Image (spheres, helix red, strand yellow):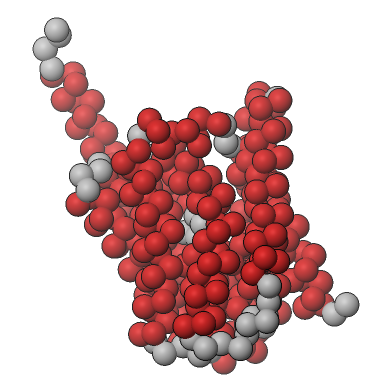
Amino acid sequence: MNDTSVFATVLLPLALALIMGTLGLTLTPADFTRIFKRPRGVLIGLANLVLISPLLAFAVAELYDLEPAFAVGLVLLGASPGGTLANFLTHLARGDTALSITMTALSSVASVVTVPLFLTLAVNHFNSSVGSDVSMLGVVARVFAITIIPLAIGMRIRARNPVRAIALEPRARRVAFVVFVAVVVGAVINEFGTVTDHFTELALAALTLNVAAMTISFSIARLARLDERQSTAIAMELGVHNAALAIAVGTSIDDLLGIPAAVYSVFQLFTAGAFARLMHRRNTVGADDSLAAGARAPAS
């Protein structure tokens, strides 16, 4: 087994399982039932994630006339759920962290359907020979094994010993971030020649998708009269995907499919970080104004 196959079939799935297990430590059943208590924000966020994001990826791939393998890889990234990094940045931005966690949890479960579905549509649309002979049932099984199972294990640990799980969460989050960075670096190193040869076209496409996704999703949320904290969470989920999942699934089919997600990961750290900084100020002012208004309100 060569280094590339070891990376794609062993290291990537293990890394992603660790990341998803870390997410599970933060979840309780309430995160999945919140859709019934606060349906508007969750439904708008999920509609952005499972429909608008992959369609934007299709449009960007067409706009830049990406070669078929890269176009499919970009759609695969667009169809991937939000990641734990989105939750962390939403927290830093003083956005609605509970909404962010709920969207990540639900979209991670939905990825068992959305990732294979849009992967199939992309392969057919771009007439790509890459992955055309891959069993979509196998992709479903792979996504299930490296997302749902570790997610459930993490939630089980949280349910059995919540105090210990909460204590472990900060350290586990840091470990997951390091693993995420290692996955991206590993993907780039594996296909360094391809990345450098196509960096310009992939960088422009990745940056366009990232900025467009955050801008459009934030605007939709505001037009739907969600507050800025909720809109922040939704935009962050659209801007910060679980690139590790896209890389893991993509490289299991063909190494080229994971390259767009690796390039996108580099940009999402900077753009989402800048957005978090901007919204932290706005959300802080909004929270202070709300507190001040509450203090001025006469007692009933």
**Residue 291 in sight:** yes
Residue 120 quadrant: bottom right
Looking at the picture, how far across and down is residue 255, in whole percent? 67, 80
Looking at the picture, how far across and down is residue 106, in whole percent? 50, 46
Above or below: residue 59 compared with residue 52 = below
Looking at the picture, how far across and down is residue 181, in whole percent? 62, 62
Residue at screen point 25% across, 43% down: 226
Above or below: residue 46 compared with residue 283 = below
Residue at screen point 56% across, 87% down: 128
Horizontally, residue 257 falls left or right of residue 279, namely: right
Horizontally, residue 59 falls left or right of residue 295, namely: right
**Residue 185 in sight:** no
Looking at the picture, how far across and down is residue 154, in whole percent? 68, 39
Work out which residue is located at the far top of the displayed protein and give it.
300
Residue at screen point 67% across, 54% down: 144
Quadrant holding the N terminus: bottom right
Residue at screen point 37% across, 54% down: 47
What is the count of numbered marks? 0
Horizontally, residue 135 falls left or right of residue 43, namely: right
Quadrant holding the C terminus: top left
